[in-house]
Amino acid sequence: MSYEGAETVLIDAWLAGVFAADSTLTGLIASRYYTELAPAGATYPLVIWQHQSPPRDILTATDHSAAVDSLLLIKAIVNAPSYATAYPIISRIVNQLDRAQASISGGNILSCTREQSFRLTEFTDGVHYRHLGYLFRIISQAT
Amino acid sequence: MSGIEISDSGMWAIASSTIAAKQQQTANRLAAKLAALFTEQMLQNGQFDTGAMANSTYATTDQQSGYGAAASAARGRNGDVDLLGDVGPSDPGSASAAIAAAYAEPQNYGTSRLPARPFFEPAIEVIDGELEDALAQAWNELVDG
């Protein structure tokens, strides 16, 4: 049986594993990837992923929930007045995640697909930030 | 002028103007519901300080936009609220839902300091799940007269 809480943690573990294993990404952001919010004082650039909608069970006749459908926003944030340094980060993330499948400890990522691009301009306390990313649809299954 | 549809159960000829009217009616209904869902989700998220953002959601049809009323309601809550421009009215056959408050985007997607509290995608996911049924219902109403 699958349940939503398990899948959200499974997705976190999968994303952290993918990012840590990719030398191109670690060259760009080291280990500065976080869920929901970066810690105070974090160095930029960095990557955030967050659930953009509550995960939904995918029901079957024989199981309460065969898998969970999640919509995540994965974005690179840079403290600069341009998207130039965010682009190679998010481009590499798309390269690693779009149409990916994986079996990891605790379950499976049945599919991960890019759905929609995202960009946001922010100016906070005199500092420019640029957010560049994609919405990803991830179907996962805890085992 | 008629639109002709051939299906397993027969051939139907229905005035395209009737189809267009039904399509518009369905789009209007879904857009109005989407705007209401934006507000509902904001309230569920606790995003209600002055109430300006929650009151700034609106729908548009091919004939009119709800922007004016939403902008007035938002300013009634906070006279200093920064509002985006009107997106409507929509193209024929379509309808839209939107949020006028400029700070809706960072609220929905988060910033470098603020965690996201999404209301946009959760509402769209609900409507997306109802779209197929709404279109089927509209078609059945056309066929059944």
Image: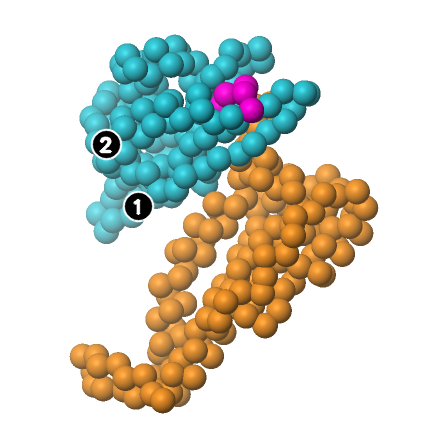
Using the rendered view, name the quadrant where residue A90 is placed.
top left
Q: Quadrant of the N terminus of chain A?
A: top left
Q: Nearer the viewer, residue B46 or B111?
A: B111
* Kind of residue at badge 1: Ile
Q: Nearer the viewer, residue B87 or A71?
A: B87
Q: Residue furthest left?
A: B8
- Chain shown cyan: that is A
Question: Element type at marker 1?
Answer: strand
Q: In the rendered image of this protein, does residue B17 appear above or below residue A57?
A: below
Could one spot residue A70 in this view of the protein? Answer: no
In the rendered view, does B58 fall on the left or right side of A48? Answer: right
Magenta residues, start to end: A77-81
Main SS of the magenta segment? loop
Residue B145 appears at what percent x and percent y? 39, 88
Q: In the rendered image of this protein, does residue B85 appear above or below residue A36?
A: below
- Chain shown orange: that is B
**Is A78 in the magenta?**
yes
The structure's colour scheme is by chain
In the rendered view, does B73 fall on the left or right side of B96? Answer: right
Residue A106 appears at what percent x and percent y? 26, 24
Could you tell which of marks 2 and 1 lies nearer the N-terminus?
1
Q: Which residue is mark 2?
A: A100
**Is A36 in the magenta?**
no
Q: In the rendered image of this protein, does residue A56 appear above or below residue B94?
A: above
- Chain at numbered mark 1: A
Q: Which residue is mark 1?
A: A58
Instruction: Please state which of the two labelled residues, at mark 2 or mark 1, is closer to the viewer.
Output: 2
Residue A78 appears at what percent x and percent y? 50, 21
Residue density around tag 1, few if under 14, some if 14–19, many if 20 or more, within 10 Å: some
**Residue placed at 47% from the left, 17% from the top?**
A45
